Amino acid sequence: QGLKPIVSTESSALVFGTATKLASDLPATDSFLGKNKVPDLQKLFQKTDGLPVHLKRGVPDKLLYRTTMALTIGGTLYCLVALYMASQPRNQ
């Protein structure tokens, strides 16, 4: 008898009503890609103005950087205070 297939080998019904489009069927225009921003960003980030890369885009980068630093310092201080409080004996 041997092994018999559990699932039928016949093709199943079409799941979606539309057929698949091939890449060759698409129009040759690249309008959906938008403008290539890479050359502009390369000019911005490769300027030798002495700024680190994470601050080259101006005010939004400075705001994010300073917020991150404030949260980091605040979190470190909070952890040190919590560690100090946990190391003290409890009064009964």
Image: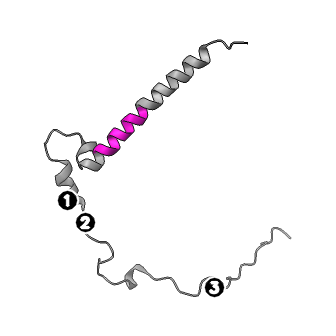
Question: For residue 36, which numbered disc appears in the image?
Answer: 2
| Magenta stretch prevailing secondary structure | helix
- Residue 85 in the figure: left or right of residue 2: left
Foreground residue among 33 and 22: 33
Question: For residue 14, which numbered disc appears in the image?
Answer: 3
First of labels 3, 2 by sequence position: 3
Foreground residue among 29 and 22: 29
Foreground residue among 7 and 20: 20
Above or below, 22 relative to 48: below
- Residue 37 in the figure: left or right of residue 18: left
- SS at badge 1: helix
Q: Residue at x 56, y 20 (%)?
A: 83
Residue extending farthest to the right is 1
Question: For residue 39, which numbered disc appears in the image?
Answer: 1
Above or below, 16 relative to 87: below
Q: Residue 63 colored magenta?
A: yes
Residue extending farthest to the left is 48
> Residue 80 placed where, x, y %?
50, 22
Residue interval drawn in magenta: 62-72
